[in-house]
């Protein structure tokens, strides 16, 4: 549990801060923050957590977000920013959606980005031909396979789905373009049907098959089981796509990679249909803890905040207060017992180093739940000279006032300065 | 994957909407939405997913949120709203934190709520005595057990921790008050140390032991493994507490329940230290899918939105755009292929019934990715008379305009009405 008390007035003395740091946002001591995950002592044979790829779908799934309207200029800006961040592939809205959608695919293909450019179409020949005609590197085919979607959406049988899939795949391959085949609503599809279909398209030579939790109802154990089973059935790469309706989209992506999936779909801030999919930033937070070396060497984490701001502005939303890494208080420490330990060694209460993302931490001292060690660090920052007993006395004053009304840091600083002035007079 | 295309112009005809509904927010067809989870065909022996309890910590963990300042009146309002929602226990900030914190514990204990009232203190005798003196039903003891916290926070040995824990537990029990013992940062603690400690406090008669992912770095598989192991070691209840730094707090809670944990800590909107803990609303979204009957019979889900609004206002934050259930677009459907299926049967693209939370769905038709079935439903709502071919023609017009600029529903309705007027003239 989080420390929740008056901090540190009764505890035994802490071990001295062996690295001597008391800064709240200065350099981060490497000591105590291992380069490899503190958790994983056993390597999983199937796991790709240290070797995964990102298919970034802000310009496809993200366009299905209620607020999204991306003109060509905005699409180009976002594609360039994603490429600079280091995503492996960028997925675009189907060229069949509208005339401009077709042109935008062409425009982005011509930018000369490092990332592969994909577009996402229904599994039929007309759509596939339009996709290939845009000049993309890969075509992502999708069709619903759950009984729900087969009955209430397209009305096709599994036999029909497989037959037409194989024709479309053969066509796309014949054009020298990569192809992925994905089911929709995979977790409510019949397992045997699904595996038969994937086995057939794998044999037909697709680069990837895709698993999609289209309605956002899957749990990590369900994901692990399905992906692990599929890993034994197909030889190609496995892409995964998770909606966030039940808050599990990040954990499901992690479970999929543990089970042998190779690719994760993301969008910036998770924007997409309904409340969206696995957010790129939250996935980075998760994976930098699991596989710090891989993630830090591959992705330009310091660009995350600017990337999120670009997209948030484009779709007129605020970055959620609780967003991993870039939420306004993701590295703010408030309870006295936390603040004390953080000042000794940030790894005590931080699993992510804010500096990896070009950010800094903040130790709040303006509340009733602060503690004297945190206040002492502020006293030192302000260059005021006090004994420990004096700091404890002024901490009591801060708590007293914070019981009555919210305090800003200016208020607290004033209390510290006036207390210090009185000390000097005395 | 989500449908991403021009909807439904090429597909085979859909099965007819057998329930005849085309309303976007009317009554919800029970058909196709099973009362029990569509996923779980096998019962787990250990699982408590259909029999869990909530320890609501908005008034403890939530007070550690950067923006939180709760005066007594606000605390009382929140406590009453949580009680009305149906949470099992309400946890309050330590009475040792400040004078007002002590008084607020007493005030809330005297409200006569159905929920048990707990307070959360460090594991020492002074704190425990203050806790008991407030009149709470239970005392939640906590101490850091990771090497990080033992070195950089309180500096105590495991032997010292166990000895003092047993003394404090004995005292609280002697006062006729329930007691929980929790480690802090459990996932970075030595497993053998942890299990030895829990075994000792279980033998001493605690009501619950607690597992805490204090830094938010755990994954569902780690959680499952630790809780399942612990389940074999102690006889008492198991409480779990998950921070959300890496976006896994909801999934971790679910994994803990699957492994035999009995209680989950939540706060409204997840507010807490840094970016917070398992949000109450997101957990409800998760659990109503896993265990619909239990959750709908136990919690007043229709009060969720008001509860979240109350807390959001109190701490001056916006409800995140992507919040499960109550985010502004959690039940908005935009891509044509989605909208078409949703109109036939909402379960196709909704794992949660918005009506269970007193909310309604919305089918957006004002974008380039809409489809003619969605437009047809709007045409019907407006009472306009068009053939399917005419609807397809006007859909093309909508897409053309939506390629140029963002459309509001008024814009789209105007297109539909003027097209209809022209049809009547012709």
Image (cartoon, coloured by chain):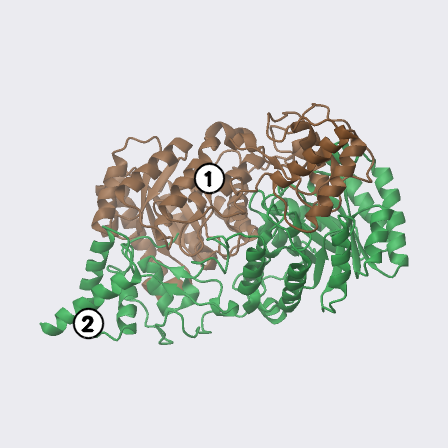
Chain colours: A brown, B green
Quadrant position of residue B173: bottom right
Mark 1 falls within which chain? A
Residue A346 position in % (x across, y down): 65, 32
Location of residue A105 with respect to A303 vertically, above or below: below
- The answer to whether A244 appears left or right of A121 in the picture is right
Q: Nearer the viewer, residue B417 or B19?
A: B417
- The answer to whether B173 appears left or right of A186 in the picture is right
> Do marks 2 and 1 share a subunit?
no
Quadrant position of residue B295: bottom right
Q: Nearer the viewer, residue A101 or A227?
A: A101
* Farthest residue, direction left: B426
Task: Check disc 1 and report the residue beneath it.
Answer: A262
At 73% across and 26% down in the image, what residue appears?
A385
At 73% across and 54% down in the image, what residue appears?
B238
Which marked residue is nearer to the observer: mark 2 or mark 1? Answer: 2
Label 2: element kind: loop
* Farthest residue, direction front: A425
Marks 2 and 1: CB-CB under 8 Å? no
At 71% across and 56% down in the image, what residue appears?
B91
Q: Nearer the viewer, residue A24 or B347?
A: A24
Q: Which mark is residue B387?
A: 2
Label 1: element kind: loop
The CA span between labels 2 and 1 is 47 Å
Residue A423 position in % (x across, y down): 76, 31
Q: Which mark is residue B33?
A: none
Mark 1: few/some/many CA within 10 Å (<14, 14-19, 20+): many
Q: Nearer the viewer, residue B67 or B56?
A: B67
Q: Quadrant of the C terminus of chain A?
A: top right
Location of residue B396 with respect to A72 vertically, above or below: below
Q: Would residue A346 be visible to someone looking at this image? A: yes
């Amino acid at each position: 549990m989080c420390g929740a008390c008056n901090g540190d007035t009764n505890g035994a003395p802490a071990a001295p801060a062996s690295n001597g740091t008391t800064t709240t946002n200065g350099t981060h001591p490497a000591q105590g923050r291992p380069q490899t995950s503190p958790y994983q002592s056993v390597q999983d044979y199937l796991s790709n957590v240290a070797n995964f790829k990102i298919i970034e779908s802000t310009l496809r799934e993200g366009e299905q977000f209620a607020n999204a309207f991306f003109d060509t200029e905005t699409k180009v800006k976002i594609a360039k920013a994603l490429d600079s961040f280091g995503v492996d592939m960028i997925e675009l809205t189907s060229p069949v959606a509208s005339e401009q959608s077709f042109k935008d695919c062409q425009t982005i293909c011509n930018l000369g980005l490092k990332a592969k450019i994909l577009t996402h179409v229904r599994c039929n020949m007309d759509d596939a031909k339009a996709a290939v005609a845009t000049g993309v590197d890969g075509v992502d085919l999708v069709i619903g396979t759950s009984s729900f979607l087969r009955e209430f959406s397209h009305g096709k049988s599994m036999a029909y789905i497989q037959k037409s899939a194989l024709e479309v795949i053969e066509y796309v391959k014949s054009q020298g373009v990569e192809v992925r085949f994905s089911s929709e609503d995979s977790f409510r599809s019949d397992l045997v049907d699904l595996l038969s279909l994937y086995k057939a398209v794998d044999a037909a030579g697709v680069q990837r098959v895709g698993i999609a939790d289209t309605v956002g109802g899957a749990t990590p154990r369900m994901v692990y089981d399905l992906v692990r089973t599929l890993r034994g059935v197909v030889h190609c790469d496995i892409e995964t796509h998770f909606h966030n309706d039940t808050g599990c989209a990040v954990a499901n992506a992690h479970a999929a990679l543990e089970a042998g999936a190779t690719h994760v779909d993301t969008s910036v801030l998770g924007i997409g249909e309904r409340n969206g999919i696995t957010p790129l930033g939250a996935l980075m937070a998760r994976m930098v803890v699991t596989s710090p070396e891989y993630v830090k060497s591959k992705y330009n984490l310091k660009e995350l905040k600017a990337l999120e701001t670009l997209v948030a502005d484009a779709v007129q939303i605020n970055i959620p207060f609780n967003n991993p890494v870039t939420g306004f208080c993701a590295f703010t420490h408030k309870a006295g017992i936390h603040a004390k330990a953080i000042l000794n060694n940030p790894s005590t209460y931080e699993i992510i180093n804010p500096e990896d993302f070009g950010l800094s931490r903040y130790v709040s001292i303006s509340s009733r739940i602060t503690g004297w060690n945190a206040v002492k660090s502020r006293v030192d920052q302000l260059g005021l000279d006090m004994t420990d007993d004096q700091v404890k006395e002024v901490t009591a004053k801060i708590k007293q006032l914070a019981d009555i009304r919210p305090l800003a840091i200016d208020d607290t600083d004033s209390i510290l300065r006036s207390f210090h002035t009185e000390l000097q007079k005395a």
